[in-house]
Image: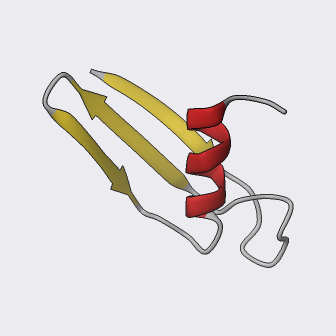
């Protein structure tokens, strides 16, 4: 199992994502406690920097 913290920042700052945790296993993945910017953090995490 892999646990990735996608953000632990401010709810009111678009540059700092809310608390969002991505859990991944060999069977699939699950997002926990997703905030407003969770989708953007997921895209950055999957694609990598840049």
Residue at point 49%, 33% (across, down): 4
Q: Position of residue 1 (x, y in %)?
A: 26, 21
In the displayed structure image, the side of residue 37 where residue 28 appears, left or right: left
Task: Measuring from the top left, give residue 22's x and y in whole percent.
Answer: 42, 42
Return the residue nearer the eye: 44 or 8: 44
Q: Where is residue 33 in the image (x, y as percent from the top left)?
A: 42, 63
Q: Residue furthest left?
A: 27
* Quadrant of the rendered image containing residue 44: top right
User: At which x and y percent is residue 46?
Assistant: 56, 35
Q: Looking at the image, which residue is at 57% across and 57% down? A: 19
Is residue 48 shown above or below 23?
above
Please report the residue visible at 85 percent of the width from the left and 71 percent of the height from the top.
13
Answer with the quarter of the image where residue 12 lies.
Answer: bottom right
What colour scheme has been applied to the protein in the rendered image? Answer: secondary structure
Quadrant occupied by the C terminus? top right
Depth check, front residue: 39 or 13:
39
Instruction: Identify the residue at horizontal 29%, vertical 48% (top origin).
Output: 30
Please state the total of marks drawn on the protein image: 0
Q: Give the quadrant of residue 36.
A: bottom right
Residue 7 visible in image: no
- The answer to whether any part of residue 30 appears in the image is yes
Does 22 sit left or right of 10 as displayed?
left
- Is the residue 35 above or below the residue 41 in the image? below
């Amino acid at each position: 199992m892999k646990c990735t913290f996608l953000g632990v920042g401010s709810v009111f700052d678009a540059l700092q994502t809310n608390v969002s945790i991505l859990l991944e296993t060999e069977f699939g993945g699950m997002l926990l406690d997703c905030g407003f910017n969770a989708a953007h953090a997921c895209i950055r995490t999957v694609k990598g920097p840049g």
